[in-house]
Image: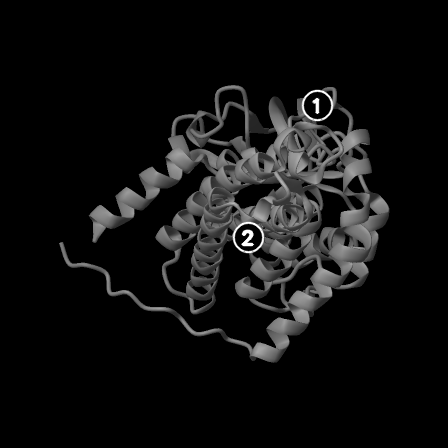
């Protein structure tokens, strides 16, 4: 096997532009997101007002071309925004990530009519979207999708159910993966744009999650829903490949989100250790806790570097699948491990609701699960490595 040469791609924009992007997201996260995080976590409320402000700042559709109303930036810019928003509250960053994926689907694969009908509202936070893949028997194994779309002479009839869908309780439109050729496996799926206020669409109750609780999740049910011919997104029977095509970018987003969670935990732990006193001295003077914080710093720095490398590789139109999986996997594992360490540094206080590190620990866990579990990421990494 020939070893892939190690390289670090160069950023495409100037350092000043990246700093402006990061600073815009950080100021918003500090002024609007972080102060609201505890209340949103407790109430599980969809923060429509925050999303409207984000849209006004251009924080939705980071990589969507400006000709379609996006910011027209690159994947590294997207990673910077996701990290800073997540440092404020991961549920808010999650919405940014969802809009990025849907915006990419529409800008790359949509028709002019579909972009005109949907994209502007999505990027302006006026149209709430759902990315509808997961089913009871199709989570990690997307090939298990059983939802069907059957031609009826006028368009299609959509039937089936999706579970654990982000925004399902509040979404206006869903991008639904369905079988259009049951005999063709992954090559027999298509994507449909579905008005979720249509006859035959119903919603399950909102799920109450362990973490990222302001991110609404639930089920969607489709019972013989009539779809017009313009509902098909991209070519017929290419839906699986189209959905998979945006997952690398999604993994960059989740990796950056995990870094933001871990960074917030580190900052809280350092501040607490410098002020909390035991045995007549601050706990920051104890070598054991210094080593915990040192491990947090080095792993978060490494995770950020992996995320940025993956983003820059994508920005140079190079194969980024392994890099994206490594970044998402490493960053997710680091976020869980080091928010746990932040709780440890806080001691009993860290286990109490109302302390930021308790929420961060809960918010971190899902980063090892969604956008492909970290076990699947390891499988992808090994597969890419063995391909040479």
Q: Is residue 134 visible?
A: yes
Task: Answer above or below: position of 82 versus 196.
Answer: below
**Drawn side of residue 342 relative to residue 125, left or right:** left
Q: Residue 208, labelled with which disc?
A: 1
Q: Where is residue 141 in the image (x, y as percent from the top left)?
A: 42, 29
Q: In the depicted view, which residue is nearer to us: 89 or 323?
A: 89
Label 2, label 1: how many angstroms apart (C-alpha)? Answer: 24 Å
Q: Residue furthest right?
A: 49
User: Disc 2 designates what residue?
Assistant: 256
- Which of the two residues, 62 or 115, is positioned nearer the viewer here? 62
The location of residue 235, given as percent across then percent down, is: 51, 47
Q: Residue furthest front?
A: 280
Instruction: Decide if residue 198 is on the left or right side of residue 259.
Output: right
Residue that appears at 47% across and 67% down: 315
Looking at the image, residue 340 sits to the left or right of residue 327; the answer is: right
Q: Can residue 153 be seen in this view?
A: no
């Amino acid at each position: 096997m020939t070893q892939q040469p190690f390289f670090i791609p160069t950023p495409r924009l100037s350092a000043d532009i990246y700093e402006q992007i990061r600073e815009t997201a950080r100021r918003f996260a500090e002024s609007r997101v972080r102060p609201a995080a505890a209340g949103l976590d407790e109430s599980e409320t969809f923060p429509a007002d925050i999303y409207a402000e984000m849209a006004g700042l251009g924080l939705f559709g980071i990589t969507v071309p400006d000709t379609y109303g996006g910011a027209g930036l690159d994947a590294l810019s997207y990673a910077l925004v996701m990290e800073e928003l997540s440092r404020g509250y991961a549920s808010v960053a999650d919405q940014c990530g969802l809009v990025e994926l849907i915006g990419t689907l529409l800008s790359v694969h949509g028709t002019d009519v579909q972009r005109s009908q949907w994209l502007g509202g999505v990027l302006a936070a006026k149209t709430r979207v759902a990315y509808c893949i997961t089913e009871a028997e199709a989570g990690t194994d997307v090939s298990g999708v059983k939802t069907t779309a059957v031609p009826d002479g006028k368009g299609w009839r959509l039937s089936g159910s999706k579970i654990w869908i982000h925004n399902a309780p509040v979404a206006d439109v869903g991008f639904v993966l369905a079988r259009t050729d049951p005999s063709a496996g992954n090559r027999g799926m298509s994507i449909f744009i579905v008005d979720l206020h249509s006859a035959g669409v119903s919603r399950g109750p909102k799920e109450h999650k362990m973490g990222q609780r302001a991110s609404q999740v639930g089920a969607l049910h489709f019972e013989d829903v009539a779809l017009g011919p313009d509902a098909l997104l991209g070519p017929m029977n290419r839906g699986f490949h189209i959905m998979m095509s945006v997952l690398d970018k999604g993994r960059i987003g989740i990796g950056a989100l995990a870094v933001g969670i871990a960074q917030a935990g580190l900052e809280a732990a350092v501040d607490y250790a410098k002020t909390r006193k035991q045995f007549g001295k601050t706990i920051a003077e104890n070598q054991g806790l210094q080593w915990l914080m040192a491990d947090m710093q080095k792993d978060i720095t490494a995770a950020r570097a992996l995320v940025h490398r993956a983003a820059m590789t994508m920005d140079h139109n190079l194969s980024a699948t392994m890099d994206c999986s490594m970044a998402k996997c490493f960053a997710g594992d680091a976020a869980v491990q080091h928010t746990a360490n932040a709780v440890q540094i806080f001691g009993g206080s860290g286990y109490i609701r109302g302390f930021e590190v308790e929420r961060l620990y809960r918010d971190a866990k899902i980063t090892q699960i969604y956008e492909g579990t970290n076990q699947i990421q390891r499988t992808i990494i090994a597969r890419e490595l063995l391909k040479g």
